[in-house]
Amino acid sequence: MRGRPQVDRLSPDDLMSLVGDTSAAPIQVGAVLILDDGATLDPAAVRSALEQRLPAVPRLRRRLALVPLGCGRPLWVDHPAFDLDEHFSVRPAAGPVTRQELLDVAAELVATPLPPDRPLWSATFVPEVEPGRAALVVVLHHVLADGVAGLALLGDLLDVGAAPADPSFPRREPAPAYLVLDALMSRLGSLRRLPATLLRLATAVVEVGSALGSTAERSSLNRPTGPSRCLRTVSTDLREMRTVAHRYGATVNDVLLTVTAGALGDLLAGRGEQLDRLVVSVPFSSRPRSSVGGLGNHSGVVPVVLPTLGSFRVRLASVAASTRVAKRRQRGASTAVLGPAFRVLDRLGVYKYFVEHQRLIHTFISNVRGPEQALQLLGCPLIELIPLSRTYGNVTVAFTALSYHGRLVITINADPETCPDVDRLCQALIAQLEALHVCSPQLTSTSPGTPGAP
């Protein structure tokens, strides 16, 4: 051990992600990076490239450490036994895998718990993906980074050249007395921030109060889920989506929420159910900008009521009005109430029961703005970036959208046992987009019988 001890604590938002990891499927996120001409890459070269970039993202070599009572929140500490081979692996196959087979691998990886005694991430290289491509599947525990921070992390890993070495790695862990002092100073700092904290709490009460007043109507969308997950993706042109949004005075996110709610309404109708509205949990980031120096979680969730019936124009106007109200509030405020409440439920041993029987929301829909410029790894262009999300508790299907280099990829994450008709949902989402004329010939669907990406 060398170097001065460093106190890198979990934030209150991070704790909420940690407490929530009690369901059958872990709260993990990530991305599938599809590389053009990647079949020519040597897996050893990919490993070496990642190893050279690791010093640029210090938390990738840190593990989560609990602390004694009175020493404050848990913290990240350098893992002296860090070994990249425990995080990087190669998934060979008898021949090139199809796109859906690649997503099946990603679904398996994101649903497999990461070992808690080491840094909470993994990177799996798939050397042959049809046609002539390769893929890198990166999985992170949500406590490590939210969607925005995760993109900053990926961007730094894909940067060109070796990062400067960190001669102080590994730093020794802080002594308990040092942690007690640090926790005391942090609490004194909290007193100085009390007015801002009270404002955030008041905003949170309003947000959570609106959630409690919008109970999700009973439906087949809410059933206790198991550990398995399946993935489907739909991709569309971002510029065309933006054109549609601006035509109606809305945002791309408003259009995404509207078409997703419409697709879910069609799915429920096919099941013999009719809901005229859905209550959806939508994350709003409170992070001013993304950087690897600010990993962790800086976001809150806002419940939004989405109509499923009526014309697209009427539904979009309703959604846009709801999101405008949410954006005027302090972003990320909801965790000021939800975080402590979830921790209390966890200590009482009833959090798992709560999330498996909650009636606050029907699903999760998140949208992350990714890089506008094209990225590459070892000279191979990154042609597609597929987001990996999580669904847990009694939420049987969730959606994550990610924009990258002019495209918007929507990933459907479903429990195959409680949402066996996920392919019907995928086709319903495609139909919603086609009705807006935003589906270009490059539309990508991974439901069986539909061609994959070109």
Image (tube, helix red, strand yellow):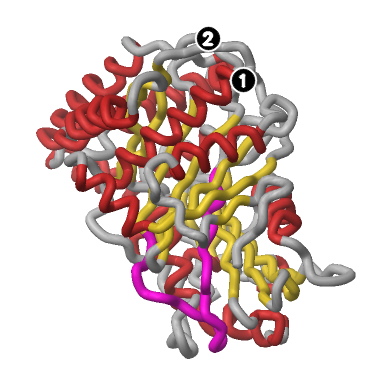
- Image-based side of 184 in relation to 234, left or right: left
Q: Camera-side residue: 419 or 78?
A: 419
In magenta, the rendered stretch is 370-389
Q: Camera-side residue: 357 or 32?
A: 32
CB under 8 Å between discs 2 and 1? no
Q: CA distance from mark 2 to mark 1?
A: 16 Å
* Amino acid found under the numbered disc labelled 1: Gly
- Residue 419 percent location from the top left of the image: 67, 28
Quadrant assignment for the C terminus: bottom right
- Residue 61 percent location from the top left of the image: 55, 68
Q: Which residue is at a point 67% across and 75% down the rendered structure image?
A: 133
Q: According to the image, label 2 marks what residue?
A: 218
Between discs 2 and 1, the one toward the N terminus: 2
Q: Which residue is at a point 33% across and 55% down the rendered structure image?
A: 240
Q: According to the image, label 1 marks what residue?
A: 270
Q: Which residue is at a point 20% across and 47% down the rendered structure image?
A: 246
**Is 381 one of the magenta-colored residues?**
yes
